[in-house]
Image: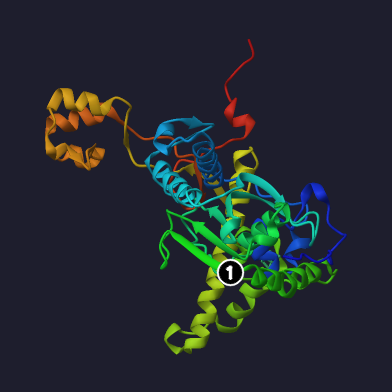
Amino acid sequence: MNIQAASVQGVFDADHSPIGASGAHRYLACPGAVKASYGRADEPSDYAMEGTIAHHVGEVCLREGKDAWEFHGDVFGEIIVNDDMVCAVQSYVDFCRSIMLGSTGPEWIEEGVTVNSVHPFLHGTVDFASSNVACGHLDVVDFKYGVGIAVDADGNPQGRIYAMGILEAMENASQVEEINISIVQPRAVHSKGPIRTETIPVTTLLEWRQDVLIPGLEASKQDDAPRKSGPHCRFCPARSDCYQLLNDIMDPWTEFGATDPDKLSNEDLGSLLTTFERLGILKAALTKEALGRLTRGGEVPNVFLKAKGTHRKLKKGAEAHFKKKFGNSDDMFEDRKLKTPAALEKLSPEIKAEVAEWAQKPDGGYSLAFEGDDAPKISRKASDIFKGKTKD
Ligand code: SF4
């Protein structure tokens, strides 16, 4: 492999690189996103925190030869390693171990890589990679814990940038001829299954680097880099006030908004539904911002906090208690686990009385409500929290 000299330099700041591998799908689709999101970062969501913990558990399993079940019930901050996380992490670990069997090394586990030949700030953290240079192979694996958006392996820019970073870090990269880039996403539904792999020759990777990546980064450096909205706006730090996203929502809406749905052409129907998809992205960003402001004690006219609805859960020790009191009746169990409180209550008045004592609603945090919603308003203003309290 012969990696050519850098062609994209300057403009970015090392500490807050907006050209990391994880954002590549966005800035390659919308060159304006690099400048629009410069210096802005989202607060990590609960979902992102769960993903971080799942990656951490996977890393420890791979480094220390453990299995995910050994972490079941462990708590990291406010995140608990539950059944779902154990199953997802184990799928990832098993897949990496199947690659390790044919590996001659070296291996990379949660390691930072940089594609210096393109830009010193083009970097990212590789979940797992392993090489078998004797066979001319390199495997790069990206673990996705998310459930909402199923990520493709084919043409995946993040995986390709990781592969380039690994090749630049390898002493014997010239022996690698072919690369498998795999996405392990056990919790999302995808037509190709939970593990998808794209196999590409190194020459294809280098062509992509020259024809797509470098021109894309060059375009994003321009002062007037164009913005282009799309599904990639979903996690863009600039989405809450992006004029392009707003224009792309408003234009079709203004044009077609007053038309009866049954009079719309198929093209217009598709265009309007795309508009609503973009609107959902903007709404989610604004909701998150309002939740943050209200939780910090601010006021946002017409909206307020209410408790997020949660389902009742059985308290710790409930299973042992119910077994002791009612025996191992099949009626009470499903997949060898105690049924839900609602299902148990239907079995008998005696069980229902026990459920009342052993079930509770966990705190689900806050959600946003609008005027007209009769839910109790929750105020996080300091004057309300400390109302009636006097200093000793
Ligand atoms: S919100 Fe979308 S259109 Fe706007 S800068 Fe970000 S990616 Fe581009």
Q: Residue furthest front?
A: 134
Q: For this view, does 103 lie left or right of residue 217?
A: left
Q: Where's ligand 1: which quadrant?
A: bottom right
How many labels sit on residues? 1
Q: For this view, does 195 lie left or right of residue 227?
A: left
Q: Residue furthest right?
A: 10
| Label 1 SS | strand
Q: Quadrant of the N terminus?
A: bottom right
Mark 1 burial class by Cα count in 10 Å: few <14, some 14-19, many 20+:
some
Q: Position of residue 88 (x, y in %)?
A: 43, 47
* Quadrant of res 2: bottom right
Q: Please report the residue visible at 72 percent of the width from the left and 71 percent of the height from the top.
A: 227
Q: Position of residue 316 (x, y in %)?
A: 33, 26
- Tag 1: amino acid: Ile
Q: Please report the residue visible at 64 percent of the width from the left and 74 percent of the height from the top.
A: 248
Q: For this view, does 343 lie left or right of residue 42?
A: left
Residue 152 visible within the image: no
Q: Position of residue 183 (x, y in %)?
A: 51, 58
- The residue indicated by pointer 1 is 200
Q: Quadrant of the C terminus?
A: top right
Q: Position of residue 294 (x, y in %)?
A: 61, 43
Q: Is residue 158 above or below residue 301?
A: below
Q: Please report the residue visible at 81 percent of the width from the left and 69 percent of the height from the top.
A: 218
Q: Please report the residue visible at 59 percent of the width from the left and 19 percent of the height from the top.
A: 389
